[in-house]
């Protein structure tokens, strides 16, 4: 792995870097222009978590206001969207976005979905001020970094929800035992780390706005389970 990408992965996974600085290691690893990290979708609030500059922030803002653009398409399809010349060869799926972004110093946009397990969480947008094509290695690096962001973005959303609703925080010792048992079940289903198994349960509870204990009991009863299909993790009920 490229040293710059490896350093960026370590930075994203580290607790030493603040959420509002998450775009910076991305920019160093894929240095083609400005970068934004945003959350949006069905289970999280729409916000720009981090942006390297005002133009990157504005690209996010346009897409949030219009509910269309490369970040929405990337998350919907769970695949990178690579638009190397949005003026000379605009994507017809986003007529309003194309018109609005012409006022900015943006000529290429690349979007990478942020997901964790079955949870759609947001996207990373990279813009360039001139027509640009990403090399294959750059696409792979950006996709890997966006994938690593999934844990950070989900944990951030869960913390925010718990701050707003204390009922989502369950300190009952019995609940902790049930969640521990359910974590073992998810481990067996998916062959993931204990931390990721726990976060999947936590994310499922967050998405439904229910206590983790309830989700854990459903997992133990077999009414909720997870399946892995390639790189995708899906919830099965």
Image (cartoon, rainbow, N blue to C red):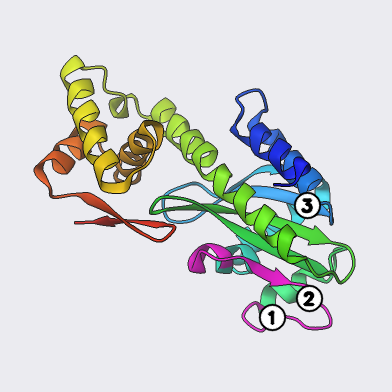
Q: Main secondary structure of the magenta part?
A: loop
Q: Quadrant of the C terminus?
A: bottom left
Rendering coords of residue 135 (x, y %): 77, 65
Rendering coords of residue 125 (x, y %): 69, 57
Q: CA distance from mark 3 to mark 1?
A: 23 Å
Rendering coords of residue 216 (x, y %): 20, 36
Q: Secondary structure at mark 1?
A: loop
Question: In the picture, residue 51 is in which quadrant?
Answer: top right
Question: In the picture, residue 110 is in which quadrant?
Answer: bottom right
Residue 86 within the magenta-colored segment of the rendering: yes
Mark 3 lies on residue: 30
Residue 89 within the magenta-colored segment of the rendering: yes
Q: Residue at x 57, y 65 (%)?
A: 74
Q: Nearer the viewer, residue 3 or 233?
A: 3
- Asked if the residue under mark 2 is in contact with the one under mark 1, i.e. CB atoms within 8 Å, the reply is yes
Q: Which residues are magenta?
A: 74-94
Q: Is residue 107 left or right of residue 233?
A: right
Mark 2 lies on residue: 86
Mark 1 lies on residue: 91
């Amino acid at each position: 792995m490229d040293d710059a990408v490896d350093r960026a992965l370590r930075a994203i996974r580290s607790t030493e870097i603040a959420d509002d600085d998450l775009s910076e290691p991305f920019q160093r690893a894929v240095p083609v222009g400005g970068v934004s990290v945003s959350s949006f979708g069905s289970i999280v609030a729409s916000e720009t978590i981090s942006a390297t500059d005002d133009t990157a922030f504005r690209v996010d803002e346009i897409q949030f206001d219009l509910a269309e653009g490369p970040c929405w398409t990337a998350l919907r399809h769970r695949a990178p969207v690579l638009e190397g010349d949005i003026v000379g060869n605009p994507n017809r799926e986003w007529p309003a976005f194309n018109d609005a972004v012409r006022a900015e110093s943006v000529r290429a946009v690349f979007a990478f979905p942020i997901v964790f397990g079955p949870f759609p969480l947001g996207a990373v947008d990279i813009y360039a001020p001139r027509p640009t094509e990403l090399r294959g290695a750059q696409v792979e690096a950006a996709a890997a970094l966006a994938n690593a962001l999934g844990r950070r973005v989900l944990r951030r959303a869960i913390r925010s929800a718990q701050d707003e609703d204390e009922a989502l925080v369950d300190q009952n010792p019995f609940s902790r035992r049930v969640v521990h048992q359910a974590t073992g079940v998810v481990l067996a289903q998916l062959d993931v780390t204990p931390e990721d198994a726990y976060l999947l349960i936590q994310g499922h509870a967050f998405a439904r706005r229910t206590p983790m204990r309830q989700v854990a009991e459903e997992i133990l009863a077999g009414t909720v389970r997870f399946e892995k299909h390639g790189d995708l993790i899906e919830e099965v009920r």
